[in-house]
Amino acid sequence: MNPSVDALRATFGNAIGRALDSCGDTIVYVAREQLLAVMAWLRDTPEQAYDYLVDVTAVEYRDRERPLELVYNLRSLARRADLRVKVTLDPRGDLTVDSVVPLWRGADWLEREAFDMFGVTFRGHPDLRRILMWETYAEGYPLRKDFPLRGRFSRAEQVRQALAANPEAHYSMEELSIAEAYDELPADMKERLRRGERGTLPDFE
Amino acid sequence: MTKRTVELELATPGLDAQGRPVRVPLAVTDTDASPTEPHLAGEHMLINIGPQHPATHGVLRLVVELDGETVVRVIPHVGYLHSGFEKLGEYRHYNQIIPLTDRTDYLSPMANNIGFALAAEKLMGIEVTPRCTVLRVIACEMSRIISHMVWLGTTAIDLGAFTPFLWAFQQRELIYNLQETWTGARLTTSVTRVGGMMADIPDDFVPGLRAFTQQFPRTLGEIDRVLTRNSVWVGRTQGVGALTAAEAINYSLSGPMLRASGVPYDLRKDQPYLNYETYDFDVVVGEHGDVYDRYLVRLEECSQSNRILEQALNRLPDGPINVDDPRLILPPKSRAMNDMEAMIYHFKQVMEGVKAPIGEAYVGIENPKGELGNYLVSDGTAKPVRWRIRPPSFINLSALPKMAEGHLLSDLIAINASVDIVMGEVDR
Amino acid sequence: MKRVIETKEVAGQSPNYLLAKFQDLIDWAVNSSRANSLWPMPFGTACCAIEFMATAASRYDFARFGMERQAYSPRQADVLICAGRLPFKLAPVIRRIYDQMTQPKWVISMGACASTGGIFDNYAMVQGIDTIVPVDVYVPGCPPRPEGLLYGVLLLHKKIKGESLFDGVPRREEQPLDERGLRLPPDQIDEISEPFGNSVHQFRST
């Protein structure tokens, strides 16, 4: 078992859940409210020095009783030690956690991917959009267990929606200016943009 | 602003007072981007590169905002090759996933097979045989060479040199021949199985690979001679897209991208797998973290791989390639047809698959592009609950805006090429 | 292509016969020129693109078959070679590229994924590019060997040489998308896309 777990317990107390060992890797569960503080501590404490974020991903189990887990693989390059930090979320409840992008820029696309594939929302992420699927993708979050392998729509409908997509999306100055002014927009417009109505001007007829 | 010079050895060298050949500075480059001309500034321009563009190395799409010719902002759009590997893996037995791993990073298929097999073996607690270990090292290093050869060839084309592409592909064809005699396929090899390899190497493989390792340095030398001190190459790559060591770590870069920035981190040395710690090779580390250093790192890694290949060939032990466990390894066809017990094991493996114990395992290996991680979560059935690939070029690519902003548009192509992306892996 | 020539009483001297011969000559000249200088538009997406590059490199060298110049712009290309898998996100792109190509144009679908979806029978992948664009030659393989691609190119040569400028029907219609935005009727797309082979078993994850 990685000694960092005991140090974490000594510092954060109840925020640290159970820790276990699987195939030689140490896994430690962290309360999601404390995630950012724990990560910052792990990165900045000289004895820990987990300066390298290897991976951010999520796991949903086939057993519907088990929570969805968010997995952070950390590594200390100098100490050559790995630590896996997990946060549990209720797959049918609120899927929001703090983003670790302020600590590691490398988490940017990894968190976008977790958002795209699992629907986990990262609070404080600078640009949380779908990354692998297109933004108006309507079938859901592909890696969730309730998502069928071949998608929810018929193949013909999938082809129709794909062909109807605009290959020149995200290619206009208006869109860039909207993205720049995003923080100042009213909440309902933010919500519309989040649903994918990005950079298109309303059609007056 | 730091200045660097590259020296050229003259074709007909004169001698200086100490009797050494005279070298002339060939190119001086600035590490800072060219300053913009504020009085000439006008409207910013937006251009779209890709997803179908020969210089994006696949179906990457870049939306670039330009001020004159200077890149103000790069917005990469990925996902145009999203194939749902990870979802597909949840519907397949462990051994059935191996053909999928070929197709993620299709420039180094054998290394991907090995990365997945190592993760599955860690999950199941299997120790492979000594011969298998050495064969896997051979396969990994062959993959590194062919992957770097594609990188060299295509990057040279992007920067205006076509000939290295032909040389590099000649070497690839030689390795393809070896891969084909071993696995039957040029590209999609599926060379490993959980607990061993799909087949032992054929008789003419060792002499063939030895012949390859003997002639390969010549090609490397040719590429070195035509590029390393070439003034166009130097001018296009030096000081372009530089990242410091701290930035490289913060962006989670790995592989040659990380080492070119001066971080001496190589999983083969620092978290050894396949007994890499017993081989004698150097970890190639750059200094400036720019495109030129990435080129030097990859070029030198090829010759280090060649060294490892020679050592591995010398130590290749005899013996079985698969672990001796009938629940794990398919019996030979003749036994499955004649022996009742072997037939039952064959049937169970094909129909039910190999069950993994409850747990999870992460194995990162040093792929040509960087750290390829395979993260497997099992709930005790024959199919993983989650198969996660930690894609090195996806994460390396996410630093592209940071590297390219402030440089010229033509530098963007060089920087993008230096990341060594392969879209099959970026998008999975 | 053999053409039935209308014969009059004295075949050798009929004006129709001469006209037919003349048309054959024109067809031969036009088709040979077209077939022997095909400019490919490499729509390379995945593994097949690497084999495509190997075909273009020194050992296989498809410049021998008149494909020296690769047209990276669709507007100067004759044949679209879709080398690799085609996800739904890329579908509008290949359709746009096909529409931008000038007539006459042909399409080679290289590899199992482009032709049928291959092993990727899942939510992300178009099950065969013929649901998006018309295809002339399918090259099987995962990926096809360079010899396979060259054979496909030679088959395309054969097909081009069988075309005629004079048979009264437009040789290749534009085939725009219909009012639903599809190339084929929806039930036909569903039928083409049905799982087959091993992937029919791929329904349960446990």
Image (cartoon, coloured by chain):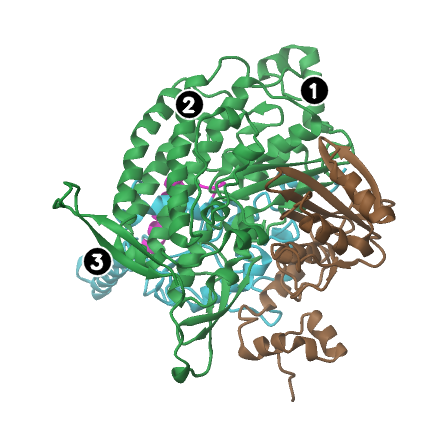
Chain colours: A brown, B green, C cyan
Location of residue B226 with respect to C197 vertically, above or below: below
Image quarter of the N terminus of chain B: bottom left
From mark 3 to mark 1, how far is it between C-alphas?
A: 78 Å
Residue identified by numbered label 1: B327
Residue C11: assigned label: 3
- Subunit bearing disc 3: C
Residue B421 drawn in magenta:
no
Decide whether the magenta segment is chiefly helix, strand or loop. Answer: helix
Q: Going by the image, does A127 lie left or right of A37? A: left
Q: Which mark is residue B311?
A: 2
Q: Are marks 3 and 1 on the same chain?
A: no
Q: Residue furthest bottom?
A: A205
- Cα separation between marks 2 and 3: 79 Å
Which amino acid, mark 2? Gln
Q: State how far apart marks 1 and 2 are (Cα).
A: 33 Å
C-beta proximity under 8 Å, tags 1 and 2: no
- Please give the range of residues in magenta: C140-161
Report the chain holding disc 2: B
Residue A189: image x %, image y %?
72, 78
**Which of pointers 3 and 1 indicates the residue nearer the eye?**
1
Relative placement, left or right, of C61 versus B318 is left
Which residue appears at 65% of the width and 55% of the height?
A: A113
Q: Position of residue A150 (x, y in %)?
A: 69, 50
Left or right for B309, reference B395: left
Q: Looking at numbered disc 3 in the image, what kind of residue is underneath it?
A: Ala
**Viewer-nearest of labels 2 and 3?**
2
Q: How many marks?
A: 3
